[in-house]
Image (cartoon, grey):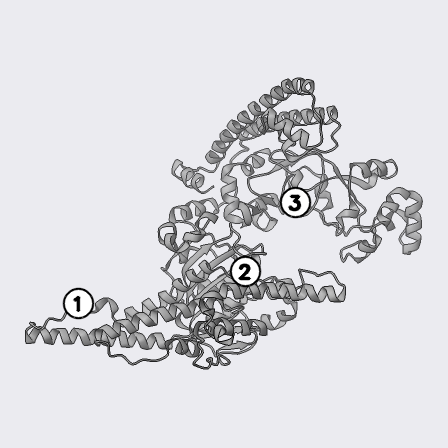
Amino acid sequence: MFENISEYDFGSDLSVNILGHVFEQSISDIEEFKSELLGKALDKNSGKRKKNGIFYTPPYITHFIISKTINEWLNEQKEKLGFSKLPVLPAFDKKMSAQQKGAYTKALNTHIKFWEDYQDVLRNIKILDPACASGAFLVSAFDFLFEEGKKVNNELSELKGGLISLFDLDKHILKNNLFGIDINRESIEITKLSLWIKTANKFDPLTSLDNNICYGDSLVDEVFPEESFDIVLGNPPYVRQELITHLKPDLEMKYKVYHSSLDLFGYFYEKSLYLLKKDGYIGFISNSFSKTNSSIYLREFLVNNSRFIYYVDFTGVQIFEGATTYPVVMVLKKDNQYKKNLFRYYKINKEELNTLSSHFEERSILINQNQIDNSNWDFVSEEEQNLKKRLFSSKTIKEKFGKTYYGLKTGLNKAFIIDKSVYELLTVESSELMVPYLEGKDLTKWSIGKVDKWLIYIQKGWTKKTFGENLTEESAKELMIKKYPLLFNHLLQFKKEAIKRYDKGDFWWELRSCDYIEKFKQTKICWPNLQNAPKFLIDDTYYFLNAPAVMLSTNEKWLLGVLNSSLSWYILKSLCVVRNGGYIEVKPQFFDKFPLPILKQIPLDLENKVDEIMELNKKIENNKVRFIEYFQSEFSLSKTSKKLNNFYHLDFKEFTKELVKQTVILTQQDKYELMGVFNTESEKINSSLNLLSKLEKELDELVFILYKISDKEKNVIKNII
């Protein structure tokens, strides 16, 4: 039995990929098991994996980073040693003249000297992963160095006629070239095991890695001295700033990139630059930080202290299992002479993941590092840079219209946001305390969807203002019950949770104060925070909004036209953080920077076009609602599916099939009668939608004219959006 185990090929059957996944899963499984023993529910947001940001890096990412860091650095060393200037080495021929033999011997010795010097570089390279987890990067680095070492040995063997000094290449790499740190002791052991699997055999003892793979905190502890490494690579922990409050005093003292809202990964960039020798390389995969306010100092630090080599944007795809992240790969060189540096930028889509390395050069674009703006990294071609420079040189929305605001936060939506049935029950006695309420999903392009929610709006200070200043909670409660018994009994269901809110009013049934409450009672442009296409509308009926929906107080229809145009989408994608699935976050901090056209007068042609579009859109919405209400009433449906709500995209067969799914029983007579109405209403709506599309294209052209966009610039914009 033991002989069989000794013959087992752990190196091929038990890969670092398997160990990495086992390590991740074991953390989750152990915590779940402990929770079960203690009879507690597992809080996945406070678990060790979440707390320490442990997510296994896919092999195609590690291989790409290795090729763009270790390989690039070694190629530079080759050039320094004269690789491209090596003389041609002809095949040896006994019939050579003495002069030819002398030239051959000189060339041969030059080649031998080069490969021996390069072998010395290879033997002394120092590579660090400052958050090594299960060792994926270090194992990939080992594989690369081992193959490169074999190539050098083969070259020297051929040049010397088979005479080379032999040594344990694999053990040398483990002992001298690879280093790792991690805050988890389990990670350290898994990394050691991953590396031992590469070199273990039944004849030799395992190489000690205690001085190479160390337990510690890279950001706080001085595990290795500064300027010790040629390469630093890895996947810094994905830990949000809320979970590192205890570290912030130390981080603020030690790091130039410190910001109170910067996530943990940001500090690894600065630390790694300090640990690198001059001209060393960093290769990290981390969350994107190109636009966030919390990363402004990080962006400044990297631009001023490193040369950008590669930037690969994965923000549109998900590459880590079990985590919603917006990753980028950055390869940097420790060199601040970047003034005319060009680096390669590549925004990748899901279909290109497996061909990342092979298509990188042809599909990436060159960006001038000197031209990127630290307030908002926007990686575009020179042609597009010139367009944006012109666009963003004008006044912003904030400068002309003032601040934008989020909707209200209740702290307990299930208590304060009510549906139609509860509203109808409570409105008999307390209509003055309820306002129509919109969520982001209710906000569509040009119009508001069906309103079926209300907000119980009892602002901080209302109780004392209504019943008297010097009230105890008990006396205030009695007065509330007396005047609003139904309303108060509804809120009583949620008392325990309402009390726990940190942002409540004077009493638990009140909302926190809102300094801009009057803005909700004004005409305003509103939009959902998350968008995958422009979705802006004017609300002149004074709805209240929830957060994170956003609003701007104005009634300017020409501005609404601009915001719903294709040019607007291009601008917003430049300003806003990109999220999964092509969505962007149109937050106030980004929207405030939206550039406006230079106007001598209000563009009436644009306003008229917006009026025309809004009128048509209203007609479409009315036709939709009328037919939906018709078949809801006809077949006693209280709710309808998403497909039924978009019935005009279905043919009649699909429509009836969807009705049957909602337990509607249709006779042949029902189908016959329904078909005519369905076809008429669908054709009517689809015809109007075609007209709407035409009008929106005309609006796009008016907006292009307003911003003085040339035909060439239009093509740039259309190709990007």
The numbered mark, 1 or 3, whose residue comes first in the sequence reads: 1
Distance Cα–Cα, label 3 vs label 2? 24 Å
Tell which circle, 3 or 2, labels the residue nearer the N-terminal end.
2
Residue at the location (78% across, 54% down)?
Answer: 504
Gap between marks 1 and 3 measured at Cα: 69 Å
Q: Which x, y percent locates residue 511?
A: 78, 50
Q: Amino acid at mark 3?
A: Ala
Mark 1 highlights which residue?
88
Question: Is 78 positioned to the left or the right of 172 in the image?
Answer: left
Secondary structure under tag 2 reads helix
Q: Amino acid at mark 1?
A: Val
The disc placed on residue 660 is none
Sequence-earlier tag: 1 or 2: 1
Residue bearing the label numbered 2: 295
Image coords of residue 1 (percent x, y):
52, 74
Q: Secondary structure at mark 3?
A: loop
Q: In the figure, residue 682 lies in which quadrant?
A: top right
Which residue is denoted by mark 3 in the rendering? 549
Q: Is residue 647 above or below residue 20?
A: above
Query: Which residue is located at x 54 percent, y 60 percent?
Result: 295
So how many labels did they put on this image? 3
Q: Amino acid at mark 2?
A: Ser
